[in-house]
Image (cartoon, rainbow, N blue to C red):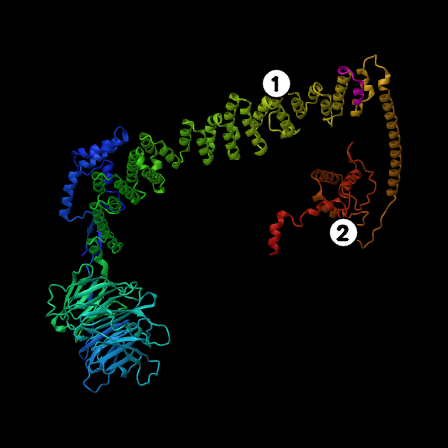
């Protein structure tokens, strides 16, 4: 038997670097590996990689594999002699192996001999002696219960029948009577309707049965009769005469010799409401199938058994007979119906599964296992049978044998000592799976432990590998053996791909498996093996990952090379190419491919596979190589498509000079689509090369992009604007003037170099543009001079620009007038200049006219000038009279103010401190507010400008230096001037200056209060401390 606890060898092991397989690829063979001949393998490698440097290296690696093959064979023999398994796992017994069926003797000494024992749902019932029923809830083993039958006659218990809930116990007596005992009752009750029948079997109703009611059940007798009955403790009450509700005959079982005892009955519910009934006699196994009709009548089994007289039920019959038979069922956990059966009869054990989906018979996969050869059934007949998941146990008078249902072999045998007596019966608790055996004086219990521990080996030996793996998935050492066996089985049956998949999951030596596929010339299977092995490597095994990745790449390229030239294998080529690309794009291989991309590029180049090289470059985000490849092959559209997809600014800058030479419109469209991601300054070299070598149409593409930058992206870099100006100056003068006009008339808001723009316009003779630049540069004289060469109206517009400098305006207009008079000799236009500019007068223009001009031409202008002079003189007279009147009114107001006074009552208080006003010097304002001098100073000082605060402090210092001030605010005239230096202000003057500063206006009614309306009540610097004081 395979041991429960196994450990791995330290090397090789799962999670560590692969053994000599990968290490051999790296050229690190074991110490005992010697160089030997390998012409076959070397020749194969040379044929694959001839002419390729990396291919030669791979051939050398494979040579090393073959060189070590002889030593590997000898080392395997050594390992086999030492007991080292081929898989890399070593058996190590860490604890004693326990049997599947673990026997335990129950510490129970019955007061009388045990006649019968039944167990169900952890409820144990046994018949002791003649008159005692012993009951025990196994969950409460310290609370046994005994019930006396109360029989006075010689009746003995024939059999006990306990339902699936452990609630209903039927006691069959050898006097053809039956008693009933409920779990919750302490007294047996007779089943009067059952009297006269020796009961051999009961088929319990698992669907309708409950703790108080059995539901319709089937009862089999020794005469072959089957009855339908029901037992209930609710109807009729506990004190009723009988608990049986009805007892009705429904069928009679017969054998060839006539009626036969009904040894076993079993009822199960199938799909679609079908009911399956299995009944056995000594040699026959009957099946009844049908539906129980719906309705109020509970006696529904009659419809199943009610069949025509000429229609017999289906049955299986065997010739031999013990005089009895027994059937056992196995119900898996979490299921309510059994899925297997085992029928013990004279010829052996009929074993099979139960398929409830079949229409007429639920028995399937039937096979007969003969009794063990070491048992003479004529002398030592089996007494009972119990079925588990993978075994059936046979009870003999002196021993128990367990037979595996998979291969019919005896896997367990347990002999009992004579002191315990002859074994009587074996039963199984269907709910808990425990097996019970008893003699007349001893009870034993078997616990089933890890029954499936060796099942994997049996399934493996019959080549049912999926089931074998299912039963050893939590035991890696066993799973490895199954996988290795499956891989070898598939290899021998030429299912190489399946073999490769299995080998990849084993711990077998890598190089042996690889060479095995190489020798069989199964390159596709080898690739599958390497792929699976690569997927199983850990991220830390970088060397192994690198070698496998490069090897797989070489194999893929070889395979693609062979398929590409064969038109008949085009679909296979496409499939292989897609697989190769999936391999290159695998996230697991990403880091390895990235770190070894140079080697991969060399492999792809050596095979001339440019298509996959481009694909690999895209996967590695090596877009520069992809774009360069497209450009080298004049596929500029594809290169631009890649650029537009990845949106890499650096690559745009690098490849734009080449692309714009061939597809300018598409390149500019791509630039525009990129928007602000591109810095237009870095594209100027591409534009310059393109525009210098191209025609006007080509230059228009450069202008289109620069206009997009200027007008859409609002580009402000001077280089962009200067280059656009240069292109305008050469190809599009109209757009040049429009650009300059849109740029505005303020030089600080214009982004181009105005001097450069002026030079460009002058070189190409764009005078209007030059005039505009002069105007922006505020060079008005030059602008007027140049404008006069183009258009007088343009010169006039320039002459009006210096609005703040009338002298310059007049000078500019005089230039225009001189040009009109002297150059154009147009007197009327000269007179129009006088009307256009109010700064010019007729006397300013007259010197420009020649002597022969008559006065008739400017008679009107002279008259208008004289009228303007007279009007101006009248306006001056009016202003003088208004000024004289205003001065007179001011003098009167001053005189009136000198005589104005105000009265102050003795109880008046200061508006600021609310103390009596007359105690200290004070101020009285016309608004009525009165302040102490110091209070007013305190209110006004913080709101004064800094220079006034400084002046006020200086006046106060000087005033205090001249002596103490008078107590009265109305100061007498100070005649003592001895302390004053010459040129120093007097005390009265200093006081007056202080009054002008402090008392210029009422602090509550003047502008000071208005200016302080938006100031906070609390100083921001004191806000935090003030807020804390309120908390």
Magenta stretch, residue numbers: 822-832
Q: Nearer the viewer, residue 271 or 429?
A: 271
Residue 841, percent across and down? 82, 22
Residue 17, percent across and down? 26, 42
Taking the magenta stretch, the answer to whether it contains residue 638 is no
Q: Residue furthest front?
A: 310
349 over 77 or under it: above or below: below
Q: Dominant secondary structure of the magenta stretch?
A: helix
Q: Earlier in the sequence, mark 2 or mark 1?
A: 1
Q: In the image, which is nearer the foreground, mark 2 or mark 1? A: 1
- Residue 1007 falls left or right of residue 129: right
Residue 772, percent across and down? 66, 24
**Would you call the spot at circle 2 few (<14 residues within 10 Å), some (14-19), or many (20 or more)?**
some
Tag 2 near tag 1, CB within 8 Å = no
Q: Is residue 1004 visible?
A: yes
**Which of the 4 image quadrants contains residue 20?**
top left
Task: Look at mark 1 in the image and give the residue it sits on.
Answer: 763
Element at label 2: loop
**Quadrant in the picture for the N terminus:** bottom left
**Quadrant in the picture for the C terminus:** bottom right
Q: Nearer the viewer, residue 166 or 465?
A: 465
Residue 529, percent across and down? 26, 43
In percent of the image, x 42 and y 31: which residue is there? Answer: 627
- Residue 922 falls left or right of residue 585: right
Q: Residue furthest top?
A: 852
780 over 879 or under it: above or below: above
Q: Is residue 105 visible?
A: no
Task: Look at mark 2 in the image and give the residue it sits on.
Answer: 911
930 over 703 or under it: above or below: below
**Would you call the spot at circle 1 few (<14 residues within 10 Å), some (14-19), or many (20 or more)?**
few
Element at label 1: helix
C-alpha gap between disc 2 and disc 1 = 79 Å
């Amino acid at each position: 038997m395979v041991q429960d606890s196994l450990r791995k060898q330290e090397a090789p092991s799962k999670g560590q670097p692969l053994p000599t397989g990968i290490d051999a690829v790296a050229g690190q063979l074991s110490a005992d590996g010697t160089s030997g001949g390998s012409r076959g393998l070397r020749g194969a490698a040379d044929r694959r990689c001839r002419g390729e440097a990396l291919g030669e290296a791979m051939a050398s690696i494979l040579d090393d594999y073959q060189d070590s093959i002889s030593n590997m064979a000898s080392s395997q023999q050594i390992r086999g002699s030492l007991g080292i398994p081929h898989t890399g796992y070593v058996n190590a017994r860490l604890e004693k192996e326990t049997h599947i069926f673990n026997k335990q003797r129950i510490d129970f000494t019955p007061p009388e001999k045990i006649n019968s024992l039944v167990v169900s749902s952890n409820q144990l019932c046994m018949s002791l002696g003649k008159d005692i029923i012993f009951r025990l809830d196994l969950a409460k083993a310290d609370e046994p219960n005994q019930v006396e039958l109360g029989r006075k006659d010689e009746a003995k218990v024939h059999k006990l029948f306990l339902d699936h809930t452990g609630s209903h116990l039927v006691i069959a007596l050898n006097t053809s009577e039956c008693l009933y005992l409920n779990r919750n009752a302490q007294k047996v009750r007779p089943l009067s309707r059952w009297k006269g029948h020796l009961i051999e079997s009961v088929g319990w109703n698992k669907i309708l049965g409950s703790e108080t009611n059995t539901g319709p059940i089937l009862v089999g007798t020794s005469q072959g009769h089957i009855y339908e009955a029901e037992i209930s403790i609710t109807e009729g009450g506990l004190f009723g005469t009988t608990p049986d509700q009805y007892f009705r005959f429904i069928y009679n079982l017969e054998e060839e010799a006539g009626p036969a005892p009904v040894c076993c009955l079993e009822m199960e519910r199938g799909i679609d409401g079908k009911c399956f009934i299995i009944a056995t006699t000594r040699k026959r196994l009957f099946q009844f199938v049908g539906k129980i009709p719906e309705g109020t009548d509970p006696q529904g089994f009659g419809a199943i058994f009610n069949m025509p007289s000429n229609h017999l039920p289906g049955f299986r019959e065997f010739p031999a007979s013990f005089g009895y038979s027994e059937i056992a069922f196995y119900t898996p956990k979490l299921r309510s119906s059994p899925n297997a059966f085992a029928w013990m009869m004279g010829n052996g054990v009929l074993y099979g599964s139960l398929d409830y989906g079949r229409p007429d018979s639920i028995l399937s996969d039937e096979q007969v296992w003969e009794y063990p050869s070491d048992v003479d059934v004529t002398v030592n007949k089996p007494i009972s049978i119990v079925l588990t998941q993978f075994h059936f146990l046979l009870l003999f008078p002196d021993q128990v044998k367990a037979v595996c249902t998979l291969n019919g072999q005896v896997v367990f045998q347990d002999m009992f000592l004579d002191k315990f007596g002859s074994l009587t019966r074996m039963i199984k608790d269907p709910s808990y799976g425990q097996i019970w055996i008893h003699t007349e004086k001893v009870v034993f219990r078997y616990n089933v432990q890890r029954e499936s521990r060796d099942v994997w080996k049996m399934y493996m030996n019959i080549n049912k590998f999926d089931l074998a793996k299912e039963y050893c998935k939590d035991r890696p050492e066993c799973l490895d053996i199954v996988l290795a066996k499956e891989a070898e089985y598939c290899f021998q049956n030429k299912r190489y791909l399946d073999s490769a998949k299995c080998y990849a999951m084993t711990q077998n030596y890598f190089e042996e498996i690889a060479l095995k596929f190489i020798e069989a010339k199964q390159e596709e299977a080898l690739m599958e093996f390497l792929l699976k092995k690569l997927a199983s490597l850990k991220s830390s095994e970088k060397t192994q990952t690198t070698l496998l990745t490069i090897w797989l790449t070489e194999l893929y390229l070889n395979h693609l090379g062979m398929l590409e030239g064969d038109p008949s294998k085009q679909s296979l080529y496409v499939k292989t190419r897609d697989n190769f690309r999936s391999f290159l794009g695998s996230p697991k291989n990403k880091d390895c491919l990235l770190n070894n991309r140079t080697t991969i590029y060399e492999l792809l180049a050596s095979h001339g596979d440019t298509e996959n090289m481009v694909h690999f470059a895209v996967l590695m985000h090596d877009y520069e190589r992809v774009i360069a490849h497209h450009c080298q092959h004049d596929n500029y559209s594809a290169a631009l498509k890649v650029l537009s997809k990845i949106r890499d600014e650096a690559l745009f800058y690098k490849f734009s000079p080449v692309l714009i030479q061939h597809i300018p419109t598409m390149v500019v469209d791509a630039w525009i689509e990129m928007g602000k991601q591109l810095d237009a300054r870095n594209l100027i070299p591409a534009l310059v090369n393109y525009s210098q070598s191209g025609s006007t149409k080509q230059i228009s593409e450069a202008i289109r992009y620069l206009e997009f930058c200027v007008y859409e992206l609002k580009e402000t870099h001077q280089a962009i604007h200067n280059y656009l100006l240069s292109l305008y100056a050469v190809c599009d003068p109209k757009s040049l003037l429009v650009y300059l006009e849109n740029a505005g008339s303020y030089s600080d808001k214009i982004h181009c170099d105005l001097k450069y723009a002026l030079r460009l316009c002058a070189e190409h003779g764009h005078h209007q543009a030059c005039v505009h630049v002069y105007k922006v540069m505020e060079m008005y004289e030059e602008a007027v001079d140049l404008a006069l060469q183009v258009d007088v109206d343009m010169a006039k517009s320039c002459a009006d620009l210096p609005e703040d400098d009338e002298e310059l305006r007049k000078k500019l207009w005089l230039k225009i007038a001189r040009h009109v008079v002297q150059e154009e000799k147009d007197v009327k236009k000269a007179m129009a200049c006088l009307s256009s500019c109010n700064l010019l007068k007729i006397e300013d223009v007259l010197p420009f006219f020649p002597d022969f001009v008559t006065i008739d031409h400017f008679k009107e202008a002279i008259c208008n000038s004289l009228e303007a002079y007279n009007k101006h003189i009248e306006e001056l007279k009016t202003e003088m009279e208004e000024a004289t009147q205003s001065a007179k009114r001011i003098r009167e107001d001053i005189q009136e103010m000198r005589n104005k006074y105000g009265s102050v009552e003795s109880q008046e208080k200061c508006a600021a401190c609310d103390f009596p006003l007359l105690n200290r010097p004070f101020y009285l304002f016309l608004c009525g507010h009165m302040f102490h001098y110091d209070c007013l100073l305190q209110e006004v000082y913080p709101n004064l400008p800094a220079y006034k605060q400084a002046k006020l402090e200086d006046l106060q210092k000087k005033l205090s230096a001249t002596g103490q001030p008078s107590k009265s605010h109305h100061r007498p005239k100070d005649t003592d001037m001895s302390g004053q230096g010459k040129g120093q202000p007097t005390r009265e003057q200093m006081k007056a200056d202080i009054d002008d500063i402090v008392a210029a206006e009422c602090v509550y009614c003047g502008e000071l209060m208005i200016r302080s309306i938006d100031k906070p009540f609390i100083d921001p610097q004191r806000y935090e401390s003030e807020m804390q004081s309120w908390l």
